[in-house]
Amino acid sequence: MDRMPSEEEVLLRMMQGDESAFTKIYRHYHASLYVYLLRFCKVPSLAEDLVHDVFLKVWEIRDRINPELSFTGYLYRIARNHVIKTIDKLTTDKNFRDQLFSQLEDVSAVQPEQQVRTKEYDRLFQEALVRMPPQRLNVFKLCRQEGKSYDEVALLLGISRNAVKKHMVLGMRFIYDYVHRHGDILLAIYLAGKIF
């Protein structure tokens, strides 16, 4: 996205609390930011909410903006961080995840879609497991599929508890990222409910 004409001046005004300057920034970047966030989350209404959240954050931290640096880069960095935090929240907050699914169920019949999502999740989950390094896969299976504690797995494999924990964190992140890259956010949320 190109810099808007006189962007530095508009940013300076916004930093001083000028709401009309903020509105200009909002209007200039809204569409491109929406498309950018939609690529991450695949849900139009969620992408729109994320756009509003990002601009709210920009307004809240406006005094920290350096108008001489690329505002576009700054804005997209805030957006990327926010969507990652939101996805993490969706995957770790069961109430929030359940609320999202209930809203989606209100909008459309989920029964057949849920079956498709489950099959797709299982396929992507298995693909992700196959792509994991052998030691990480072994740790993941022992902890998640056999229900062993980190201490038990450390003893069994002759590695430290911290190594087991690191393998689990990296393993779950890898699976989540794999499903997110090859599926959509709803599948990633579904996955999170299954593995976290």
Image: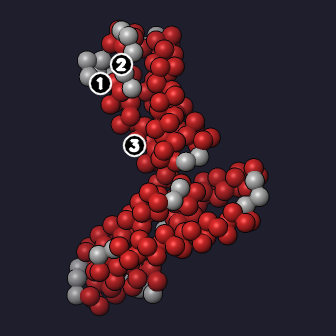
Residue at which label 2 appears:
3
Earlier-in-chain disc, 1 versus 2:
2
The answer for how far apart the CA atoms under marks 3 and 1 are is 17 Å
Q: Which mark is residue 166?
A: none
Q: Percent x, y for residue 151?
A: 32, 83
Label 2 Cα crowd, 10 Å radius (few <14 / some 14-19 / many 20+): few
Label 3 Cα crowd, 10 Å radius (few <14 / some 14-19 / many 20+): few
For residue 35, say whether it is visible. Answer: yes
Q: Percent x, y for residue 75?
A: 38, 30
Under circle 3, the secondary element is helix
Closer to the camera in the image, 51 or 53: 51
Q: Residue at x 30, y 17 (%)?
A: 67
Under circle 2, the secondary element is loop
Q: As displayed, is residue 96 above or below residue 73? A: below
Q: Residue at x 49, y 69 (%)?
A: 124
Q: Residue at x 38, y 77 (%)?
A: 130
Q: In which quadrant of the rendered image does the N terminus lie?
A: top left
Earlier-in-chain disc, 2 versus 3:
2
Q: Is label 1 or label 2 in front?
A: 2
Tag 1: amino acid? Ser
To which quarter of the image does residue 144 belong? bottom left
Q: Are dots 1 and 2 in contact, CB under 8 Å?
A: yes
Residue at which label 1 appears:
70
Earlier-in-chain disc, 3 versus 1:
1
Q: Residue at x 48, y 72 (%)?
A: 125
Q: Is residue 64 left or right of residue 97?
A: left
Label 1 Cα crowd, 10 Å radius (few <14 / some 14-19 / many 20+): few
Tag 2: amino acid? Arg
Q: Which mark is residue 81?
A: 3
Q: Check the image and name the residue furthest to the bottom.
A: 156
For residue 164, say whether it is visible. Answer: no
Q: Is residue 106 left or right of residue 81?
A: right
